[in-house]
Image (spheres, rainbow, N blue to C red):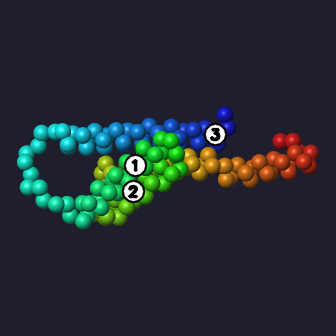
Amino acid sequence: MSNRKFITQTALWTARISGTSVLAFVLFMIGAHIFGVQPPSDNEPLTTTELLSVICGIGMLIGLAIALFREGLGGLISTLGIIGFFIVRSDLIANPGLEGWFVIPGLLYLIYWYLHSGKSDKKQYTTQLKNNHNGNDK
């Protein structure tokens, strides 16, 4: 197995495992919030910042779900969702806590997509063709 293929497969499986873990964790927390026993609240409407944070979080979750089937698109949506979250909640940038780990799967999916897309493979293939045409079989 070539070094590039090993790195590509490692990025993919690390992204899948970490992305699925993040997805399962967040869905578990949402389910616990919905079905859990909690004291009655005052039912105040969400502020604009809270609403935008929820929308960006949902975008990240949708991106991670899509990335299981379409790595590039899902990684992009997930990464943009978490970047949007940190733009809306700029107070968390200095001390991101658990949310800081949520950006890793999206970035790994993008790395995998870039390595797997073949942009640099085309250049390598063209070089091999030229070498084979000139009689330099390497």
Asked which secondary structure carries label 1, the reply is: helix
Residue 48, relative to residue 57: is it above or below?
below
Three-letter residue code for mark 1: Ile
The front one of 47 and 100 is: 47
Three-letter residue code for mark 3: Lys
Q: Which one is in front in this view, the residue at disc 2 or the one at disc 1?
A: 1
Asked which secondary structure carries label 2, the reply is: helix
Label whose residue precedes the other's in the sequence (3 or 1) = 3
Residue 80, relative to residue 7: is it above or below?
below
Q: Which one is in front in this view, the residue at disc 3 or the one at disc 1?
A: 1
Residue 127 x/y as whole percent: 80, 51
- Residue highlighted by disc 3: 5
Quarter of the picture containing the C terminus is top right
The front one of 35 and 127 is: 35
Report, in whole angstroms, how far the alpha carbon at label 3 lies from the one at label 2.
29 Å
Residue 43 x/y as whole percent: 11, 55
Q: Which one is in front in this view, the residue at disc 3 or the one at disc 2?
A: 2
- Residue highlighted by disc 1: 62
Residue 95 visible in the snapshot: no
Quarter of the picture containing the N terminus is top right
- Residue highlighted by disc 2: 81
Three-letter residue code for mark 2: Gly
| Crowd tier of the residue under label 3, counting other residues whose Cα lies within 10 Å: few below 14, some 14–19, many 20 or above | few
Residue 49 x/y as whole percent: 25, 64
